[in-house]
Amino acid sequence: MVELNSYGLSQMIQRSCFLVVLAVFISTLTIFARLGQLPLRDPDEGRNSEVAREMQRSGAWLVPTYDGLAYLDKPAFYFKAVALSFSVFGRSEAAARLPSALFGFALLAMLFAFCRREYPPGTASIAVIIVATTPLFFAFARHVIFDMALAFLVCAAIFAGYLAEGAEGRRRKGWYLAGAAAAGFATLVKGPIGFLLPTLVLGVFNGLDRRTGPAGSSATSRRSTCWSSLAWYYPGLLGSRAFAPILRTTGSSRSRFTDSRTLRSAAPARSIIMGW
């Protein structure tokens, strides 16, 4: 009986190891294989890569430009990641897509670590394989676009919020702080959706389970999200005069931040962040 149990345990370990190796292989294949083979696709890949190229060439890391004009449709976080990739690996299709690929691979690693806390390694590996072979996932992981970086940070915020509900004391507060920071950085990637989405998911989760959630347990986590995400809106809060010298160095005579319509449209989002 002992020999049978030992044999069964050995088979289980071998099966788990096989699934882990298979998950790593499939993830690497779907995300990195022939990453730079296809030319950049219009309009998103070409535009985002050009903004990053101008940032890397000019060294203007604060205000992104497109065709020499200030380009403030999106925060600069993702453009900086692509520009850094250009600086290290040179300007190519593979280098432009590498940040999205790394965020995608990091998301799969985080998914495995999260599932491993709740389930056996084999189950965590199967979850990774399912996500890695989802067409929309590996398509965005191989595209010069913001969505994979956003997905990684939003999932990090949600996972941290979930783990916080299973912890107590300082660990609970630490998980909520980590989740709030991830939501703040997600806001730096693509705007208010970065903190609205994890807040909605965790709010529904805590409501269904009748938990207090972050709203009732840590005001510090809300302040962390506020200050992290405020970095994008800071130019608008300062006003056009304070930012005019920086914008002039980019060759733009008129920024979208100096447009009163843009300031009015951004005001509700800033109000939500400041009030939250």
Image (cartoon, grey):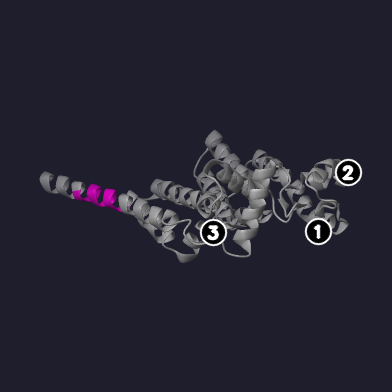
Q: Residues within 10 Å of mark 3 (few under 14, many from 20)?
A: many
Spot occupied by residue 217 in the image (x, y as percentages of width and height): 62, 42
Q: Secondary structure at mark 1?
A: helix
- Separation (CA) of disc 3 from disc 1: 29 Å
Residue with the mark numbered 1: 265
Q: Position of residue 206 (x, y in %)?
A: 57, 53
Between the C-alphas of marks 2 and 3, the distance is 37 Å
**Lower sequence index among marks 1 and 2:** 2
Q: The disc labelled 3 sits on which kind of residue? A: His
**Residue drawn at the location 48% of the way across and 48% of the way down:** 106
Residue indicated by mark 3 = 143
Say what secondary structure mark 3 lies in. Answer: loop
What secondary structure predominates along the stretch shown in magenta?
helix
Q: What residue is rendered at 74% in x and 46% in y?
A: 63
Comparing 45 with 207, the one in front is 45
Horizontally, residue 224 falls left or right of residue 7, namely: right
183 or 119: nearer the eye?
A: 183
Mark 2 vs mark 3: which is more N-terminal? 3
- Residue underneath mark 2: 241
Whichever of callouts 3 and 1 sits on the residue coming sooner in the sequence is: 3
Total tally of numbered discs in the picture: 3
The segment highlighted magenta reads: 11-19
Identify the amino acid type marked 2.
Answer: Arg
| Residue 9 percent location from the top left of the image | 20, 47
Q: Are marks 2 and 3 in contact (CB under 8 Å)?
A: no
